[in-house]
Image (tube, rainbow, N blue to C red):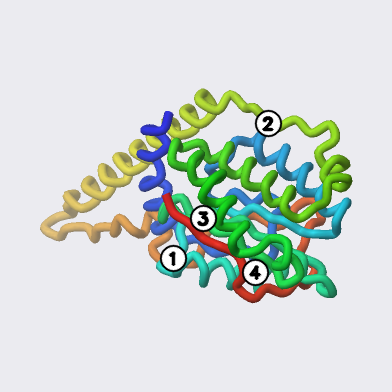
Amino acid sequence: MVHVLRTTIPIAALSSLLLGFTLPDTPAGRVNDFADILATETEQTLEQLLARYEEATTNQLVVVTVPSLGGESIESYSISLAEKWKIGQKDKDNGVILLVAPRERLVRIEVGYGLEPVLTDATSALIIQRTILPAFREGAYDEGVRLGVEKIIEATTDEETRSRIFSGYTPAEPDAPSLLEDRALWGVVLFLGALFLILFLDQARGSHTVGRRRRRRIPLYWWFGGGSGGGSWGSGGGGFSGGGGGFGGGGASGGW
């Protein structure tokens, strides 16, 4: 499974470069899996958990995965995302962003001003190094993200609040090998099939002649949208949006 996942990451990255990726102006929800590395069950479970976390604390924690950082450092990308989405309450600056960039193999926890005293840079680094990265190195993105979210919640709540948030909570246990391998394999098959068809049509058009004049070939990149604007990832859902929270670069980053 790990081999399949790691093989498909470059393909996903190539697709994102060809089609383009633009970060939406607002989050689609509390879990924004733009890189498509999480199982549906994981997304749904985390969405519910993060909603309960916000209800109990007013803190806003969002998960974001992206196909590519576009050449930026993860710190620069993360703070730009924080400024754009304004996660957290305006008067409390209590937002947290868990950002994952599988192509660059980087992860970051971005912490709002108001939570820096409890979710310190050192604590964020420990969560990344001891909890998230070991899972990511095995290709277990669902587990790494889920455990990372749980640790962030634990670090920013007291025992009584944690008890309420996690009451009745059962971590998603999707049939990860089957689901992720099927998704990966079908992605490879569809990508290669489309590429073969495009190359075939491109070659056929290029070699076809009318009289003594060769017909103009349609460039390969045209079929992929040729450098036009970024792909659409859909609009927000569930009525979730940032509350105007501020960030100042607190947090930590890591790679695998």
Give the residue at mark 1: 70
- Image spot of residue 155 (x, y percent): 72, 53
> N-terminal of the two: label 3 or label 4?
4
User: Along the horizontal axis of the image, is 143 left or right of 52?
Assistant: left
Residue 107 disc label: 3
Of the image marks 4 and 1, the number of the one nearer the N terminus: 1
Q: Quadrant of residue 252?
A: bottom right
Q: Are there few (<14), some (14-19), or many (20+) residues within 10 Å of tag 2?
A: some
Residue at 21% in and 48% down: 203
Amino acid on which disc 3 is placed: Val
Disc 3 element: strand
Mark 2 or mark 4: whose residue is earlier in sequence? 4
Is residue 129 visible from the viewing direction of this image? yes
Q: Which residue position holds label 2?
A: 172
Residue type at numbered disc 1: Gly
Q: Secondary structure at mark 2?
A: loop
